[in-house]
Image (spheres, rainbow, N blue to C red):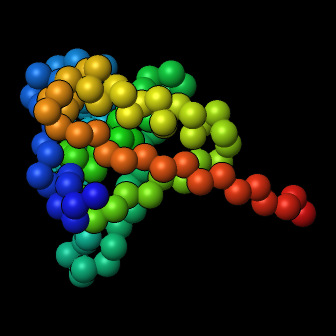
Amino acid sequence: MAEHYFQDNELQAEGLANLRLCQAEALQALKDFVPHDEDGARKRGLVVLPTGTGKSTLMLATPYALGVQGRVVILTPRPNVSTAVLKSKQNLLNFKLLSRSQQPPEVLEIVRRTQEV
């Protein structure tokens, strides 16, 4: 994947209209978020949405909206969450967030079971 993949592949305005209102508002809030305060200290952001409102699709759209440079890693706590994230990759095309000529990001799934303590 190219280093500037998310910067070179912007979200399509037509697709943004296909998002749920809460997704569109969350995406705008993320774009408006300033990750550093006046002293240069790093701030953390948090997106909270109810079950079934499309957090996985929002998660995959966010690097495009922010013009992230480099790679993005998404860690999930359970297999059902990682399955939702993998399925949401297709939503980028279905919702027309990416044009058909744009390649969706490469998604790799690495599964490692940890020993419970």
Compared across the picture, whether 70 is left or right of 114 comes to left
Q: Position of residue 98 (x, y in %)?
A: 19, 32
Where is residue 35, by image quadrant? bottom left
Which residue is painted at 20% across and 75% down in the image? 38
Which residue is pictured at 38% across the width and 42% down the height?
Answer: 59
Quadrant (top left, top right, bottom left, bottom right) of the N terminus: bottom left
Task: Identify the image quadrant of the C terminus.
Answer: bottom right
Q: Nearer the viewer, residue 43 or 15?
A: 15
Q: Tell which of 17 and 96 is nearer to you.
A: 96
Tell me where residue 103 appears, x and y as whole percent: 23, 40
Residue 95, visible in the rendered structure: yes
Where is residue 36? Give x, y as percent: 26, 70
Specify whether 92 is left or right of 101.
right
Above or below 110: residue 38: below
Question: Relative to 30, is 116 on the left or the right?
Answer: right
Residue at 53% across, 31% down: 84
Q: Is residue 34 visible?
A: no
Q: Is residue 71 above or below residue 37?
A: above
Q: Residue 22: x percent and y percent?
A: 33, 26
